[in-house]
Amino acid sequence: MSAELNNKRIAAEMASLARELLAALDRDQRQHAFFAFEDAERRRWFYTPTDHGGLSMADMDVAQHRILWRLLACGLSVGGYNTTAVVVGQENLLDLVEGFGVDWGRTRGRDPLAYWVAVFGEPGQQGRWGWRFGGHHVSVHFTVVDGRIVSTTPCFLGSDPASAPLLGPHLHRPLGAVEDLGRELARSLDEEQANVALVSAVAPSDLVTSNRTTLADQDGVLGLQHVWRGRFEEAIDALLGDLQVKLDASLGVTPEAEAAWAYTTRPKGIAASRLRTGQRELLRELLLTYVGRIHDDLADAQMAQVDAGFDELHFLWAGSLDPMTPHYYRVQGVDLLAEYDNAARGGNHVHTVWRDLTSDFGGDPLASHYLAADSHGHDAIGHRHG
């Protein structure tokens, strides 16, 4: 079956499951879950344990949960689904790490039910619609136009802790391959290559692009106060600001380091065209840990596009080359951006995102106008339509 037919087959199944989910909701639930496609809320996204917008799993019953997980399984690969399920369940592990004491203004701050689903527009074979699923360390987005999936990004997965003990010698590492392949590629660089790719000995405290809707030259880390649905009350906001200052100080962040890793529309780092054959193979394998999160048939089509512009990809690294120490990398091309940060908790807290720089959220040409007041990803705007 051709890539186009596969896409339409998956889109049809996705629409059917989204309709089934909406039909299973009562009126109040639907008021929370359903938005007009044109609503500005569609272009907002988060990866912190904030309200992601939509209907919370805590406000759904188990039968509705199953339909939601079926919808996720429809859009994601087996590996992508499994990793997403593990990350959601890992909230229980993180609660233990933090002594069951974090609340973020809720009864339970680390909660595997604090994940939200939202549907934008009426799911079907005509017109535009989309859906997203998100909560702490998960943000999945699909946009469909006239029965064809036109966007699967932004696609975020994170893990805190990145590595944790299990019974026996094996470690629990949901995003281990994303880390290990990136480090293997960085370590494979010879001195001349490394001088181009390794831009700083200091890693940023978070993704440089953060949770911005659109990106611009010289964007840098937003900071802990600004990556939530709204600003906290004064005391907590001040605490987050203080934590950001301390984290940056512990990492050794300087203006020079910030300038070195700042996002630019012209990619930084070493071009894939300057990599040896084995290194190019490593880079492609690394990118599969991002693109391969979505359904295999969709990922194959995406990787064909990646391969077509492979020589224009650039690889950048900042921070240490050793495990369990703060480090960061990104791969950027004309359209593709894969970004990874592991700086918090001494290099044991991973954030990863895959974005399409021209087609995030479906590549709406009105993107620059949708969230003019939200260019930093933290103003609370958007209204439900149900």
Image (spheres, rainbow, N blue to C red):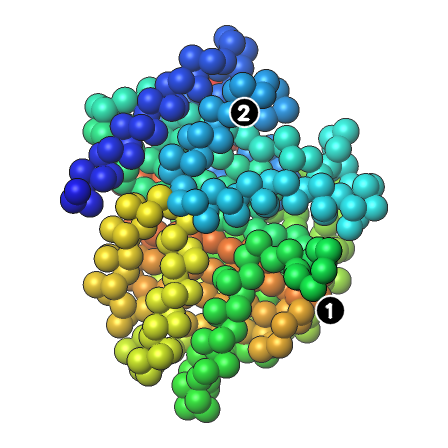
> In the shown orientation, is residue 310 left or right of residue 228?
left
User: What's the residue at 31%, 80% (across, down)?
Assistant: 277
Could you say which quadrant of the image residue 129 lies in?
top left
Q: Is residue 266 visible?
A: no
Q: Amino acid at mark 1?
A: Ser
User: What is the count of numbered marks?
Assistant: 2
Quarter containing the C terminus = top left
Q: Which residue is mark 2?
A: 65
Q: Amino acid at mark 2?
A: His
Residue 66: numbered disc? none
Distance of mark 2 from mark 1, alpha carbons? 41 Å
Do the numbered discs 2 and 1 sit on residues whose CB atoms are within 8 Å?
A: no
Q: Could you say where residue 181 lies in the image, as x and y percent from the top left? A: 48, 69
Could you say which quadrant of the image residue 315 lies in?
bottom left
User: What's the residue at 23%, 39% (across, down)?
Assistant: 6
Of badges 2 and 1, the one in the foreground is 2
Q: Is residue 109 visible?
A: yes
Q: Could you say where residue 271 lies in the image, as x and y percent from the top left? A: 33, 76
Q: Could you say where residue 98 lies in the image, as x and y percent from the top left? A: 79, 48
Of callouts 2 and 1, the N-terminal one: 2
User: What's the residue at 29%, 45% (across, down)?
Assistant: 298
Question: SS of the residue at dot 2?
Answer: helix
Q: Could you say where residue 325 lies in the image, as x and y percent from the top left? A: 66, 71
Q: Residue furthest front?
A: 168
Q: Residues within 10 Å of mark 1 (few under 14, many from 20)?
A: few
Vertical relation: 296 (above or below) 110: below
Quarter containing the N terminus = top left
Q: Which residue is mark 1?
A: 250
> In the shown orientation, is residue 322 left or right of residue 129?
right
Vertical relation: 26 (above or below) 240: above
Q: Nearer the viewer, residue 381 or 20?
A: 20
> In the shown orientation, is residue 98 left or right of residue 372?
right
